[in-house]
Amino acid sequence: MSMVVPTAEPSDETLAARAAAGDDRAFEAIVERYQGRVYRLACRLTSDTDAPDVLQDTFLLVYRHLPSFRGESQFGTWLYRIATNAALMLRRARTRRPAESLEAFLPRFDAQGVHLATPAELQVASRADELLDRQALADKARGVIARLPDVYRDAFVLRDLEEMSTADVAHALGVEPATVRQRVHRARLMLRGYLSDLVGVKP
Amino acid sequence: MKEIACASGVDLLMDYLEGVLSADLRSALDAHVAGCPRCVAFIASYRETPRILREATATALPADLQASLRAFLRAQRSVPPAED
């Protein structure tokens, strides 16, 4: 994952080395730099309620494991992997309500495999953010992502919302890149149809 | 060249956009989309979906959580509060 860090600031790797050597200010600088991103990831993978716990777990794990960070991956990638695992661990500990089906939002075709909807109808989801109230869309977006089956949710959140590379997502989730692509694709299809439905058009 | 319909084209989209589709399937999809306004419209919305949801779920860390995280981590490390 590429990070845009001003040149005057110490690099992640420099901070990590200092923090591992016991420099508390360096550790706090790492927290400062990543807390917003970890919180956002935690909200997307769990919920607003669980995100604070994920945030705490993540940085405690980072602190404990800093001495074993060897720089084999970028520091940000390493930290994101810890945050992802912390979120997934916490989610596993929760009783899951059964996932509601989002199959109804998949695209529909006629017997010849031609899209049933018109071009105008097919395009409308791409303007969902212009057509819907910002806060309403934010609420609906959080809700529908939580409704995705877990395997689709995880792949979609990491690949499309956190913009990790497919290879990094595959590594973080312990699956093949082709599996990540298949899951992200399925999630995109459902979510695209959902956005379309939100603005009142059949997917 | 193999002809494809909208439905099979949709199945290939992710691999197409990630650049891992074979050359013959890529050409077949390009040929189909060039003559299919429905697929052009569908692909536009398929590509925009991640961006719309990314922006809609870009939650900022509340200041009180930031403070409690800092206090939690200090307690865990038994570090006295900084004077700054």
Image (tube, rainbow, N blue to C red):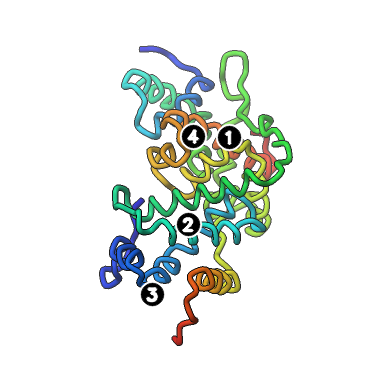
Q: Chain of mark 1?
A: A
Q: Nearer the viewer, residue A51 or B36?
A: A51
Q: Name the residue beneath numbered marker 4.
A: B43
For the residues labelled 3 and 1, say whether their Cβ atoms are less than 8 Å apart: no
Horizontal side of A178 relative to A157 (left or right) equals left
A144 in relation to A65, above or below: above
Amino acid type of the residue that numbered disc 1 sits on in the rendered structure: Leu
Please rate how many residues cluster around mark 3, counting C-alpha atoms within 10 Å: few if below 14, some from 14 to 19, many from 20. few
Q: Position of residue A14 (x, y in %)?
A: 28, 65
Amino acid type of the residue that numbered disc 4 sits on in the rendered structure: Ile
Spatial CA span between label 2 and label 3: 17 Å
Looking at the rendered image, the disc whose residue lies closer to the viewer, 2 or 1, is 2
Q: Name the residue beneath numbered marker 1.
A: A122
User: On residue B36, which mark appears?
Assistant: none
Spatial CA span between label 4 and label 2: 41 Å
Horizontal side of A140 relative to A8 (left or right) equals right
Q: Name the residue beneath numbered marker 2.
A: A61
For the residue labelled by badge 3, is the local secondary structure a helix, a strand or a loop? helix
